[in-house]
Image: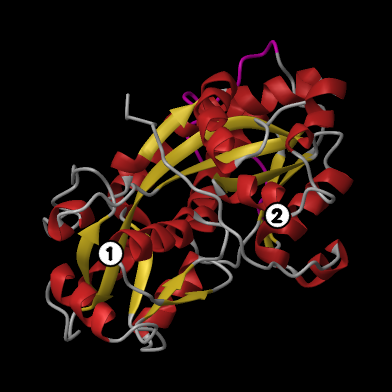
Amino acid sequence: MKPRALRYATCIAAVGLMGVAACSSSSSSSVGGSSGGDSSSATAPAAAKFDHNQLTIIIPSSPGGNLDTNVRLLQPALQNALGATVIVQNNAVGSGLGAAQQLLQMGSDCSQIIANNIPAILYNIKKNPSTIQSDEFEPVANILTDYGTIQVQKNSKWKTFSQFIADAKANPGKISISVASTVVSNYQGMLDLEKAAGVKFNIVPFTGGGPARTALLGGQVDATASNIFESLSIASKTTVLAVQQSDNKWPSQTENAPTMSSALGVTVPSSSTLYGLFTSSKCKSSNPGDFQAIENAVGAASKDTSFTSQLQKLGTLPSLDYMDASQFSGAISPIAKEIGVQPLGG
């Protein structure tokens, strides 16, 4: 079992409030029929039957990010296990707030769920208490866990993390760093790094991890704060300067980069992200059979070889970290307490 003592501090940043109507132009995809996946390994227990023909998974970011990519990889196996068509729909409004509102407005019957990460959903609750609350969301399962880094282009003038920090100290606010949004762990991680190292960055939020990494490759920013496994697709073009964990357990994926703490000689809080699925609390309370069917199907799909083989090909299989609803809730509770919100669940 991987350690889940994750450290987060309160992040305060403005998020624009927009209506769910903006979802009318969101992108979506579906996998028809029951093709895809290994039917022998992705079948939910018969005791819990999903009472809908279709399940929509809302992604609170633009297409191409880590969450979006992995949900789409899971999609065929989940559809097979659930016995219903699975649609993936992107709603990047308000750094996840629009997706949360969509779920609460349309997901009480369990026909819609949301894929999100911890701590993002908790920060959105913290910053928008009059709009969404902890007891309105129910954890279903965690699928993946990923770990923070800071990365630059291969041809960057910074060859080591120490050089990078020295330059940041000499030029406060000049070095730009992209992050997926203001509610992700990497954003908080950069605030923690600023405080620990005594530096100031220009932290630039985007509408998802994909656009944030593209900004680095396109030269729009100097660096990106991104997780290890979600960044493997750009590894040939980037250098990992440092890992934001207490020790680097992934040397082959990070070019044996040092930890931030070891490179600086000071403690830099760790940055980790849990990627999971959530329903509305009304779904679980009003339709417990549907909720159980979804949880069972996600558990089966996460073990399906059609999913795990794709992770293996991408080199991201070590990030697979399935937790059922009870385990996921237990992992979320201490993080929620540190951020200053109530644990999730009705």
Say whether disc 2 or disc 1 marks the residue closer to the N-terminus. Answer: 2
Direction from residue 12 to residue 249 in the image, left or right: left
Which residue does the image show at 81% across and 52% down from the upper left?
Answer: 101
Direction from residue 335 to residue 149 in the image, left or right: left
**Location of residue 5 (image quadrant):** top left
Q: Is residue 196 above or below residue 53?
A: below
Crowd class of label 1 (few under 14; some 14 to 19; many from 20; radius 10 Å): some
Q: Say which element carries label 2.
A: helix
The numbered mark at residue 153 is none
Which residue does the image show at 67% across and 28% down from the upper left?
Answer: 294
Q: Say which element carries label 1.
A: helix
In front here: 14 or 286?
14
**Location of residue 344 (image quadrant):** top right
The stretch in magenta equals: 30-47
Q: Is residue 163 visible?
A: yes
Residue 27 in picture, x, y percent from top left: 69, 67
Q: Amino acid at mark 2?
A: Lys
Q: Is residue 58 above or below residue 292?
A: below
In front here: 126 or 80?
126
Q: Is residue 141 above or below residue 158?
A: above
In front here: 13 or 296?
13
Q: Is residue 3 above or below residue 314?
A: above
Which residue is the site of mark 1? 197
Q: Check the picture and name the quadrant holding the N terminus.
A: top left
Q: Amino acid at mark 1?
A: Ala
Residue 291 in picture, x, y percent from top left: 73, 25
**Location of residue 2 (image quadrant):** top left
Residue 52 in picture, x, y percent from top left: 82, 33
Q: Is residue 42 visible?
A: no
Which residue is the site of mark 2? 127
The CA distance from mark 2 to mark 1 is 27 Å
Direction from residue 127 to residue 255 in the image, left or right: left
